[in-house]
Image (cartoon, rainbow, N blue to C red):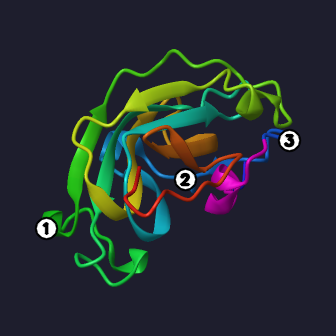
Amino acid sequence: SSPTIPEYAFNGTIVGNNDCWHSKSGNFSSGIAQWLSFEFPTEKYITKYKIWSRNHSDNLQPNSWQLLGIHDSQINSISDFSYNIDSSYNIIDTRSGQTSWVRPTGGTSDITNDTKRNEYYVANPGYYKYYVLHITSSGHSSHVAISELAYYANDYPYGGANIYTLNSDDT
């Protein structure tokens, strides 16, 4: 499969097997990670995130990753991000062995009904402008795919199907 654009992971739909972010070819066993980033207009305090797998039987779901938080002051733009410069980000959540994925049915019903997804609470939340899902393994040796990724602050979703703004005090 050809890689698809990252924005597909934040478009609020799971229309078919190409309505996803599909990584470029890499090689997880050689330490080549894949990553998917999201930039907020201002720093947000994310406490939870949800991932809907690709609507396909190809087993490209992420198995292991770190969620990275990046302050506005740490980089000028996401193009400045480098995993090799550990002062440019904070590891705020780490997951491994994530193999229990349910294939979405397509459309927007899985998002609207909040079904067929995996949900994770951020271990060390903070205020960050950029969030990077740094994926180190998947069910495939060289690719990973995600239909939807949604971030939540106090249960208000960012990305995914609905966009909400927080109150001025971020509650």
Confirm or deny contact between disc 2 and disc 1 (CB under 8 A).
Answer: no
Q: Nearer the viewer, residue 52 or 143?
A: 52
Which residue was labeled with disc 2? 25
Tell me which label, 2 or 1, sits earlier in the chain.
2
Q: Is residue 32 above or below residue 103?
A: below
**How far apart are the alpha carbons under marks 2 and 3?**
23 Å
> Residue tagged by mark 3?
15
Q: Quadrant of residue 88?
A: bottom left
Decide: marks 2, 3 in contact (CB < 8 A)? no
Q: Regarding mark 3 in the picture, which secondary structure is present there?
A: loop
Amino acid carrying mark 3 in the image: Val
Q: Residue at x 75, y 33 (%)?
A: 112
Q: Residue furthest front?
A: 168
Residue 87, numbered circle = 1
Residue 46: image location, x then y, percent: 38, 48
Tell me which segment is drawn in magenta: 3-13
Measure the C-alpha gap from mark 2 to mark 1.
27 Å
**Residue 108 appears left or right of 117:** right
Please check the rendered image and state whether residue 12 is part of the magenta-colored stretch, yes or no. yes
Of 42 and 149, which appears nearest the observer?
A: 42
